[in-house]
Image: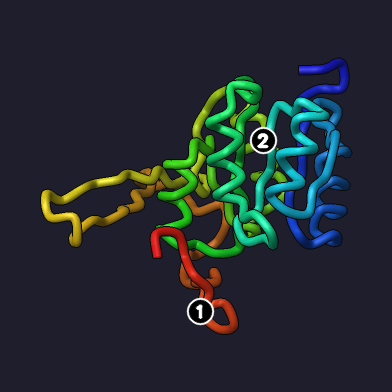
Amino acid sequence: MSARGVRVLLVDDQPLLRYSLATIINNEPDLTVIGEAGDGAEAITVARASAPDIILMDVRMPRLDGLAATRRICADPTFAGTRILVLSMFELDEYVYEALRAGASGFLLKDTRPEVLLDALRRTHRGESLFAPRRVAVRTVDPHPTRRALRVHAAPGTPDPIGPAADRPRGGGADADRPRPGQ
């Protein structure tokens, strides 16, 4: 952690979203945005030059998507001290599972409230794993590989800080034809 706090690299292909996230994060005395990237390939380059503590990584981006970039960063010893928090507008089990497999420390949805995002950044920096934020993803593998399932469990009695799951995008519409991880 630097004198200004936790160093965050923002990675998203939407400049307005990066600007909004930077504004929220830079208003905190213990957090600072030290760089931005518009795709996964640029994220790797900027991360090498800036040595962030945390990379806030979008999933769907041009050139190199966030899951592939996460995989490369987590496999590179140069980034041993860097944690990745994946941020997506799609609550797809495949994305959560692929983020876990790639080495991400957490997974949040883009409809997360600002205070939840800030808490997630701090918790990720402390080494905690955070998955959307009151859920813990548990991978269960059936002996028959075609019957694999990702189950999401909520802590009993805990209100959902990011709203009901039924209100979130599920990847339909214009993105329905886009390949998903593992396809």
Residue underneath mark 2: 121
Residue at the disc numbered 1: 176
Q: Is residue 183 left or right of residue 126?
A: left
- Number of labels in the image equals 2
Q: Residue at x 52, y 45 (%)?
A: 133
Is 183 in front, or is 19? 183
Residue 25 spot, x, y in % from top left: 81, 40
Q: Dot 1, how many residues are within 10 Å of its Cα: few (below 14), some (14-19), or many (20+)?
A: few
> Is disc 2 in contact with disc 1, using a CB cutoff of under 8 Å?
no
Quadrant of the drawing holding the N terminus: top right
Quarter of the image where one finds residue 74 = top right
Q: Mark 2 and mark 1: span between their CA atoms?
A: 30 Å
Identified at 59% across, 56% down, the residue is 109
- Residue 26 percent location from the top left of the image: 87, 38
Mark 2 and mark 1 lie on one chain; the one further toward the N terminus is 2
Of the residues tagged 2 and 1, which is closer to the observer? Answer: 1
